[in-house]
Amino acid sequence: MNNTDANLHSIKEKLISFGDAAPVAELLPTVLPQAAPFVSSDPYAFSIATCLDRGTKAEIIWTIPYDMKNELGHLDPQKIHGMSLEELTALFARLPRRPRYVNDAPRTVSELTRIVVEECGGNAANIWQGRSAASVKRTFMSIHGVGPGIASMGVLLIEKTFGVRFADLDRPHMDIKPDVHTVRVLYRLGVSDATTTEAAIQAARRLSPEFPGAVDGGLWELGRRFCFASNPNCAGCPMNDACGKRIQ
């Protein structure tokens, strides 16, 4: 890599600034405008989307809880806790938008809902209220289909969305969630040496060793708004003057 320490510092600062400036609505994009305030204010809806966020466009994922509410007439964890896996499977089959791993989604929602009802008194906010970041990550990772990347992303989004500040957050070990956007942008910036998830994670650690996850939001926003897979908008990109422009 040809980046100097000074250039890496500049890239990091620009990414963090860009990510911090992004409103919550940008980080939780939805297909339907009315779904955005719902998923950003309802902790259970937020948790469902977080746990399903794998392999599908973010706009679809963050709209699914709203679709579930419309289909059921509610998004009450107590009532959903009483649904069988077969009933949840039928629910997802009826939704206008579905997660990529639709066969796993019923189990994911069922296990999340059990935690909300049986361990959190029916209030999904109790997954994080008064708890440590490590505890929140363990809770999310105990749910079917949720790996460390999704769990870390969930912790970071909880801070951003609900104004929580985890005093114990082990920031040096809090990685980005590598996806098509973050992987692509890190490579094109010249920070990552390959378009792989592992290379992206290592690149973010080099870029921001004290808190790799701090650049996640900025990378993701750049990928969605400027650094497209085809025909990237380099002229309008806030990283234009610091970018390696490694277009494949």
Image (cartoon, rainbow, N blue to C red):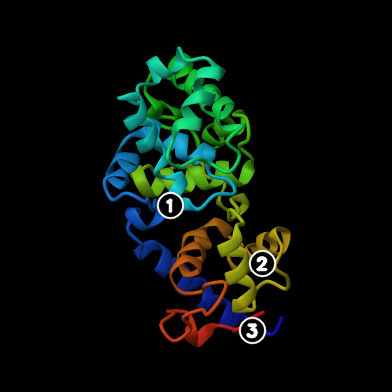
Residue 13's disc is none
What's the residue type where badge 1 is placed?
Glu
Discs 3, 1 touching: Cβ within 8 Å = no
**Horizontal and vertical percent for residue 63?**
39, 44
* Residue beneath disc 2: 203
| Mark 3 closeness class: few <14, some 14–19, many ≥20 residues within 10 Å | few
| Mark 1 closeness class: few <14, some 14–19, many ≥20 residues within 10 Å | some
- N-terminal of the pair, mark 3 or mark 2, is 3
Image quarter where the N terminus lies is bottom right
SS class of the residue under badge 2? helix
SS class of the residue under badge 3? loop
Disc 3/disc 1 C-alpha distance (Å): 36 Å
Residue visible at 51% across and 79% down?
232
Residue 4's disc is 3
* Residue beneath disc 1: 59
**Horizontal and vertical percent for residue 45?**
39, 34
What's the residue type where badge 3 is placed?
Thr
Q: Nearer the viewer, residue 58 or 196?
A: 58
Q: Nearer the viewer, residue 198 or 137?
A: 198
Disc 3/disc 2 C-alpha distance (Å): 14 Å
What's the residue type where badge 2 is placed?
Ala
Q: Quadrant of residue 122?
A: top left
Asked if residue 77 shows in the view, the reply is yes
Q: Nearer the viewer, mark 3 or mark 1?
A: 1
Is residue 202 placed above or below 83 in the rendered structure? Answer: below
- N-terminal of the pair, mark 1 or mark 2, is 1
**Horizontal and vertical percent for residue 220?**
50, 62
Disc 1/disc 2 C-alpha distance (Å): 26 Å
